[in-house]
Amino acid sequence: MQSERARALQLLQRIERERLYASLLLMGESGFVRTVVLGVLRWRSRLDFVISELAKRPVKKLDPPVVDALRVGLYQLLFMDVAQYAAVSETVDLAPKRARGFVNAILRTVTRGNVPEPRDPATRHAHPQWLFDRWARTYGAERAERIAAANQELSYPDVLALTEVMPDGERSKLVPGVWKLHGGSAELDRADFYPMDEGSAVIAAIARACGDDVLDLAAAPGGKSLYMEHHGARVVSNDVSIARLRPVRGSRVVVSDGRRPPFRKKFDVVLLDAPCSATGTIRKNPELKWRLREEELQTFAKLQRELLESAKELAGRWVVYSTCSLEREENDDVVGDHGDITPFVPEGVKQWVDDGVLRLTPESGADGFTAFVLHVGRASARLFGAAG
């Protein structure tokens, strides 16, 4: 029977080889396997720093299967409360036979407390240097380090409460109707709740505050549409994929390319939560930071601009443009001129508004989102509480 450590190693190799999403692949796995896989993904560059320092050579000069096994073993020794002898012996068994002496030596060195510490914040918080440097330029070095540190924290589910039943958690301080669970996922199987990150709910609340008649132009997976409907809006949910729209419960659903939608009417509000690099979701999806390359940030820009032009054509009053990206190329450079989003944001989010733009970063406890409001028709601002 395959051990949990062997299973974790196998899944890590599949995630790397097949570019899979860890959160989907880990459904149904044991808590130990999930912890090891997500932990290795979360701390990969820091683990590699330790390997390189103790091996006296760069990780890229070691055989990948050896590095994979060392990452699994080091994560257990450095970040988990497990028996050291088990972490070492079982990890050595997972390594290629020719390298087991080498793996054993590295892990034994760590058990004796010989753990090199990185000085630079990017490695200390296990983020690619280029990404950390971008955030330092955008937000300043101190806030960049807070963002990176927040991405390293364990992430538990948030849920939208659909009834008066209260889940085992605490109310969100950012947005009404959302609860932060206390570490477990038992509540996710109940019809009373819908899994939804606080950041996503904030974006839905902003769009709801703009008006009653809303088109969710890129609606998948459907949580924002559900939130707006639950708070009294009339919502049409549009997406190019019917499969990804299945969670939408009450909205009118249209399947179309948002750049060429079939609508003849205008909507009071068009919400465009655009496809993006998702750099605001690294806490929940740590594999993203190792896959993304800086030159790829422009990949989505053309699609985002085309979708935004479509949204403007369909909006009678307001467009809410958002992404779960923290990067300028996918936000400010796409939107250009914009209004002040402040009157539409929930009270708990106002501190995250900068010069009229919502810049919700992960140290808020939510996924990172950037959002703008564009006034395309005659309208007056409506405060969140007045939106129904």
Image (cartoon, rainbow, N blue to C red):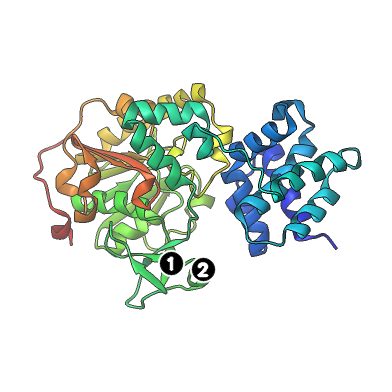
The residue at 60%/46% (across/down) is: 21
Residue 67 image point, x, y percent:
74, 38
Q: Can you see residue 255?
A: no
User: The disc labelled 2 sits on which kind of residue?
Assistant: Gly
Q: Is residue 139 left or right of residue 2?
A: left
Which of the numbered marks, if any, corresponds to residue 181? 1
Q: Give the Cα separation between the discs numbered 1 and 2.
A: 7 Å
| Location of residue 373 (image quadrant) | top left
Residue farthest to the bottom, as pictured: 165
Mark 2 residue element:
loop
- Front-lying residue, 267 or 37: 37
User: The disc labelled 1 sits on which kind of residue?
Assistant: Leu
The residue at 54%/26% (across/down) is: 293
Mark 1 residue element:
strand
The answer to whether 235 is drawn above or below residue 125 in the figure is below
Crowd class of label 2 (few under 14; some 14 to 19; many from 20; radius 10 Å): few
Which of the numbered marks, if any, corresponds to residue 184? 2
Q: Are marks 1 and 2 in contact (CB under 8 Å)?
A: yes
Q: Can you see residue 386?
A: yes
